[in-house]
Image (spheres, grey):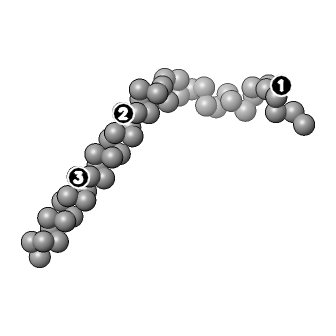
């Protein structure tokens, strides 16, 4: 029982660290700079995407 608890604590700590690292990377990369822009992307007229 104690072994399972230790394994679960280590696993959750590692997963939490991974997700925290991914979140920090996304913030540094600018993913959350302008959250309002996402709803206007569909109105953007890109010349390269016309077929």
Q: Residue at x 73, y 32 (%)?
A: 42
Element marked by disc 1: helix
How dense is the environment of label 2, judged by Cα within 10 Å: few (below 14), some, or many (20 and up)? few
Please tell me which of labels 2 and 1 falls first in the chain. Answer: 2
**Label 3 sits on residue:** 13
Query: Disc 2, disc 3: CB below 8 Å?
Result: no
Which residue occupies the extreme right position in the image?
51
Q: Residue at x 25, y 56 (%)?
A: 12
State the CA–CA distance, disc 2 to disc 3.
Answer: 16 Å
Which residue occupies the extreme bottom position in the image?
1
Q: Residue at x 82, y 33 (%)?
A: 49
Instruction: State left or right for residue 21 relative to residue 43.
Output: left
**Label 2 sits on residue:** 24
Give residue 47's position: percent from left, percent from top. 83, 25
Query: Disc 2, disc 1: CB below 8 Å?
Result: no
State the CA–CA distance, disc 3 to disc 1.
Answer: 46 Å
How dense is the environment of label 3, judged by Cα within 10 Å: few (below 14), some, or many (20 and up)? few
Please tell me which of labels 2 and 3 falls first in the chain. Answer: 3
Occupied quadrant, residue 50 = top right
Give residue 4's position: percent from left, percent from top. 17, 71
Quadrant position of the C terminus in the picture: top right
State the CA–CA distance, disc 2 to disc 1.
Answer: 33 Å
Give residue 23's position: percent from left, percent from top. 38, 37
Q: Is residue 26 above or below residue 18?
A: above
Please tell me which of labels 3 and 1 falls first in the chain. Answer: 3
**Label 1 sits on residue:** 47
């Amino acid at each position: 029982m104690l072994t399972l608890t230790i394994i679960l604590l280590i696993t959750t700590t590692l997963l939490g660290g991974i997700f925290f690292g991914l979140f920090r990377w996304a913030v540094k990369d600018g993913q959350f700079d302008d959250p309002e822009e996402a709803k206007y992307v569909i109105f953007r007229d890109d010349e390269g995407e016309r077929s």
